[in-house]
């Protein structure tokens, strides 16, 4: 057998060039890669200390007067009568921005349609949109006029006089839990969701009814982040100065895009907000700090979405609770996900086998890793 030495030399030369390219790329990116990997390893190994001891609570503790001042903005729109019925299963806060008129319209006509929920699902779910004011002085007056018209029709806007920006998301968290405590403390569950979330309301209601029948307490469920490290890059909107948060790991928390707490946990979180410094602007992390203060831990629900959209498929719709990143397709997804043929698609041996195979293909590949975990394929 004869070897073509010219081909061999050419192959080795290409190998050498390829290796040099890879090494050059690694050298250029190594600092960022190393920081990312080491940061996550340190954070995950540190999370036991964060979740088990109260040194974070002590560092964020302030007087009641100072804690109360963080959310003491005047109401521009308020509806204290929203929860006048006694049998409210769920109080659902949708975090929205003043200019997102179309998002609110889409929600009201699909998963947030309270008439549909009452008529078809037989429960009281109260949907309230929470917001501040538009940060642009030149646009604010015109948008406020539109909001007054919108609220006159729907009577579901809850607005305080703070700038509606990313760095004021924690103010929205305070608004939700404090308003709920004052006006809807009897709601069996409380949910917080972004306005680009899709909620499969029939599945959510069914799940909450089962939990309610079991007498659920200490419930805080959603897509859980464990051992997440603070972002120290100044060009990131999630940048966390070391002066504000000095530790290597955040406490465990659920993604702020959508989570549910039971009535007793809502009351505990409210109490926590009266003793903590709420200047930390990442609301879901602040929620985690509130939770460890009162001894509550987040519980993973595999059908609460992370940062990405859930795959479009009836086998997914059958059990989905939330999916993130929906703006223009809410109506389409609502129609597809609640279609009669979705019910029982995985029933029987072959149905279950089919849906398991579909979900393995959709959920156990990296493309959908930010939605549902692979283990959702087997549940």
Image (tube, helix red, strand yellow):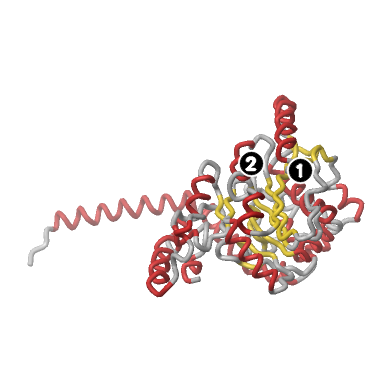
* 109 in relation to 309, above or below: above
Labels 1 & 2 near each other (Cβ < 8 A): no
**Which residue is drawn at the image coordinates 70% and 63% (left, top)?**
251
Q: Residues within 10 Å of mark 2 (few under 14, many from 20)?
A: many
Alpha carbon separation for disc pair 1 and 2: 13 Å
Give the image location of residue 125, x and y in percent.
69, 55
Which structural element holds mark 1?
strand
Report helix, strand or loop for mark 2: helix
Q: Which mark is residue 101?
A: none
Q: Which of 282/352 is in front?
A: 352
Q: Residue furthest left?
A: 1
Left or right for 16, reference 246: left
| Percent coordinates x, y for residue 313 in the rendering | 44, 57
Q: Which residue is mark 2?
A: 104
Residue 79 occupies which quadrant of the picture? top right
Q: Nearer the viewer, residue 207 or 226?
A: 207
Query: How would you rate the neighbour count of disc 1 (Cα within 10 Å): few for under 14, some for 14-19, many for 20 or more?
Result: many
- Answer yes or no: is residue 283 visible: no
Name the spot of residue 182 as percent of width and height, x first. Answer: 85, 53
Identify the residue position indicated by label 1 in the image.
158
Q: Nearer the viewer, residue 3 or 306?
A: 306
- Residue 339 lies, in percent from the top left, at 48, 55
Residue drawn at (71%, 62%) of the image: 261
Give the mark, 1 or 2, whose residue is nearer the N terminus: 2
| For residue 347, side relative to residue 42 (left or right) | left
């Amino acid at each position: 057998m004869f070897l073509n030495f010219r081909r061999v030399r050419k192959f080795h030369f290409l190998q050498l060039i390829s290796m040099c390219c890879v090494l050059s790329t690694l050298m250029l990116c190594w600092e960022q890669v190393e920081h990312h990997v080491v940061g996550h390893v340190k954070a995950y190994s540190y999370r036991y200390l964060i979740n088990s001891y109260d040194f974070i609570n002590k560092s964020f503790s302030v007087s009641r007067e100072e804690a109360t001042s963080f959310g003491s903005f005047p109401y521009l729109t308020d509806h204290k009568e929203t929860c006048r019925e006694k049998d409210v299963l769920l109080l659902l806060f949708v975090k929205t921005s003043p200019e997102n008129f179309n998002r609110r319209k889409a929600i009201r006509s699909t998963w947030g349609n309270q008439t549909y929920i009452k008529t078809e699902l037989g429960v009281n779910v109260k949907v309230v949109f929470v917001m501040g004011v538009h940060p642009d002085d030149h646009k604010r007056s015109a948008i406020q006029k539109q909001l007054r018209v919108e609220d006159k029709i729907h009577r579901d806007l809850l607005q305080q006089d703070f700038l509606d920006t990313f760095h004021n998301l924690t103010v929205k968290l305070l608004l939700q839990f404090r308003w709920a405590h004052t006006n809807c403390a009897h709601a069996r569950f409380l949910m917080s969701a972004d306005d680009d979330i899709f909620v499969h309301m029939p599945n959510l209601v069914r799940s909450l009814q089962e939990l309610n029948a079991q007498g659920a307490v200490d419930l805080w469920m959603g897509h859980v982040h464990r051992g997440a490290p603070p972002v120290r890059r100044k060009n990131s909107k999630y940048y966390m100065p070391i002066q504000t948060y000095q530790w290597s790991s955040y406490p465990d928390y659920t993604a702020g895009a959508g989570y549910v707490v039971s009535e007793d946990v809502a009351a505990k979180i409210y109490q926590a907000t009266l003793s903590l410094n709420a200047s930390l602007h990442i609301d879901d992390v602040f929620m985690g700090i509130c939770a460890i203060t009162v001894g509550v831990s987040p519980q993973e629900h595999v059908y609460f979405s992370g940062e990405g959209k859930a795959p479009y498929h009836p086998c997914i719709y059958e059990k989905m609770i939330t999916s993130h990143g929906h703006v223009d397709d809410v109506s389409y997804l609502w129609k597809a996900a609640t279609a009669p043929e979705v019910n029982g698609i995985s029933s029987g041996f072959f149905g279950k086998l089919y849906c398991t195979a579909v979900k393995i293909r959709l959920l156990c590949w990296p493309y959908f890793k930010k939605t549902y975990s692979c283990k959702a394929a087997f549940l």
